[in-house]
Image: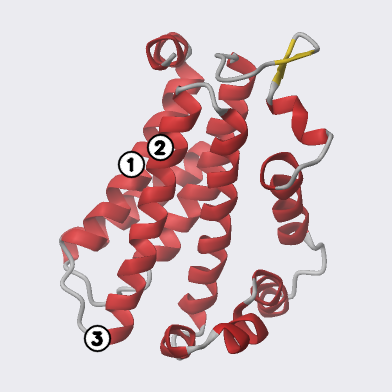
């Protein structure tokens, strides 16, 4: 399955370009997690979120290339949710330790996914509810048992038991990963304002490339 999926990717310049962006985003996360020595408890906590981002990305790749698209999209939702949290911490860094020290009740009250989305919308003056719509889309397609979600487990109108290779699903997953992982990786790297100049340059180069790919 993986060989067949990779053959499809390398035969299509657009698929290959998207996979390369995903790989570079993972490299950015890896670099800021491994090569940057945390300078505070808050930074060390953020690096644990970097590990979550990296592992969700790696899991999504293994699942998608093996033909398990629905569970691969579920990892994309996890990446989106983590990215929103990192975006919140980017402009409200004082909440990082509060989040770490919160019990379940306080974390749900202050940092539940819906609370974070609303806080970001209010911060940005965004009344379109785009974040909510995108989160709900992935929830319906992948994370929750819904009839609409069966489109990721059917081929030619018939349900598939187990993995299968489908170029349309592979293209959609890679597009979603670029949309979710790219910005999340940037939000993660921005948690470390005093990083080594080489790491900062890596972040800037990746950000420029991400804008170019998404434009």
CB of mark 2 within 8 Å of CB of mark 3? no
Task: Point out the frontmost of discs 3 and 1.
Answer: 3
Who is closer to the viewer here, 122 or 94? 94
Tell me the number on the disc at residue 7. Answer: none
The reply to whether residue 207 is visible in this rendering is yes
Q: Which residue is mark 3?
A: 40
Q: Would residue 172 be found to the left or right of residue 155 on screen?
A: left
CB of mark 2 within 8 Å of CB of mark 1? yes
Q: Which residue is mark 1?
A: 24
Task: Point out the frontmost of discs 2 and 3.
Answer: 3
Residue at disc 3, secondary structure: loop
Q: Position of residue 33 (x, y in %)?
A: 25, 62
Q: Check the image and report above or below for 116 versus 10.
A: below
Tell me the number on the disc at residue 21. Answer: 2
Question: Which image quadrant: the N terminus?
Answer: top left
Q: Check the image and report above or below for 64 versus 107.
A: above
Residue at disc 1, secondary structure: helix
Q: Position of residue 144 (x, y in %)?
A: 73, 47
Q: Residue at x 82, y 62 (%)?
A: 128
């Amino acid at each position: 399955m993986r060989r067949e999926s990779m053959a499809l990717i390398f035969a299509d310049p657009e698929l290959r370009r998207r996979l390369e962006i995903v790989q570079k985003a993972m490299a950015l996360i890896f670099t800021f997690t491994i090569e940057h020595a945390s300078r505070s408890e808050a930074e060390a906590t953020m690096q644990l979120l970097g590990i979550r981002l990296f592992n969700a990305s790696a899991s999504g790749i293994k699942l998608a290339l093996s033909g398990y698209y629905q569970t691969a999209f579920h990892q994309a939702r996890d990446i989106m949710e983590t990215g929103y949290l990192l975006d919140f911490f980017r402009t409200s860094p004082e909440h990082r330790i509060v989040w770490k020290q919160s019990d379940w009740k306080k974390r749900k009250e202050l940092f539940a996914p819906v609370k974070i989305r609303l806080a970001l919308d209010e911060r940005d003056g965004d009344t379109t509810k785009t974040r909510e719509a995108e989160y709900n889309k992935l929830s319906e397609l992948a994370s929750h048992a819904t009839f609409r979600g069966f489109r990721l487990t059917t081929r030619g109108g018939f349900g598939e038991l187990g993995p299968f290779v489908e170029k349309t699903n592979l293209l959609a997953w890679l597009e979603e990963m670029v949309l979710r992982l790219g910005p999340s990786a940037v939000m993660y790297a921005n948690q470390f304002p005093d990083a080594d100049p080489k790491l900062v340059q890596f972040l800037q180069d990746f950000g420029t490339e991400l804008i170019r790919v998404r434009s």
